[in-house]
Image (spheres, rainbow, N blue to C red):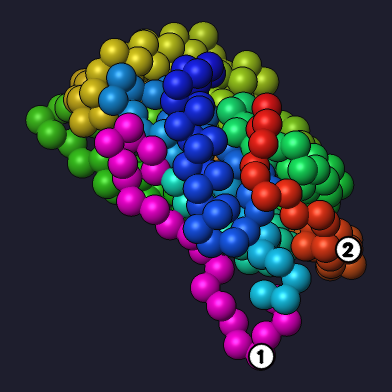
Amino acid sequence: MRIEADIRRAIEARLAALEQEHGVRVLYAAESGSRAWGFPSPDSDFDVRFVYAHPPDWYLSVMEHRDVIETPLDDLGLDVSGWDLRKALRLFLKSNPALYEWLVSPIVYCGNRGLGQELRALAEQGFSRRALAEHYLKISETKKRKSQDQGGMVGVKKYLYTLRPLFALCWLREHETLPPMALPEIVEGIALSAEVRRALEELLEVKSRTKEQGLVPRSPLLDRWIGQATEQGEEFVKGLPSRKLPLEDLDALFRRQVMAESPSQTGDRD
């Protein structure tokens, strides 16, 4: 998914401004949401998520400090928010699915400080398939409940938000690697009937030219697939062991990143 040059510059400028405003270094920033998932609408926002580090002294405090940076949606449709490195690593230790998806995003705005590469390598060594599978089941069920039938019609965005976690769950059943973030890549790597693939392609085509709140007719075929995939996923999760990454590796990474040189500007992020 290509981001237009002027939008990319605006995002990089926003990240640089946040570094100055909060006295932090942005270590990694990527697109999340529908643009990274491969099915944006013409009016989709840019969901920019980042991980940042404070100077070392910030962490040497008796009191805990606020560990997130959030900004309001602006006129360009930029939704920018981030997590402090320590918060991110604590969640990474628990195989937090949101952070894992940031790391495999096909759209990276800042990745030249090594964090993303190191975390991806650690994740592939020991991520918890159970934690991810449980997350995808929960997300799909939540989105399914919210996609209320409107006279045989359903929001195309909510329909895809129900389907995508189940496709990612299928990936976990068939592979021992992290699922790609982009839906087309997931679908290429899993077993699906030609009919389901065709129905999904039609849905994606509609999404590409429909505004965020657009409606489509419910697909009996996709609805049946959702039910079957959910049942199979529930059985799959039962047989998965719990697993945690080694704390020592994350402690070492944390110290390296916090103690690194602090450039005054974000510089080239490609």
Taking depth in this image into account, of 188 and 195 the one nearest to the observer is 188
In the rendered image, residue 224, in percent from the top left (x then y), is placed at 39, 29
User: Marks 2 and 1, Cα distance to the nearest angstrom?
Assistant: 21 Å
SS for tag 1? loop
Q: How many marks?
A: 2
Read off the residue under disc 2.
252
Q: Is residue 19 left or right of residue 251?
A: left
Quarter of the image where the C terminus is located: top right
Classify 8 as above or below 143: above
- Residue 5 vs residue 109: left or right? left
Q: Is residue 261 left or right of residue 32?
A: right
Picture residue at 26% right of the left edge, 40% below the top: 147
Residue 266 visible in image: yes
Q: Which segment is the magenta one? A: 59-79
Q: Amino acid at mark 2?
A: Ala
The residue carrying mark 1 is 62
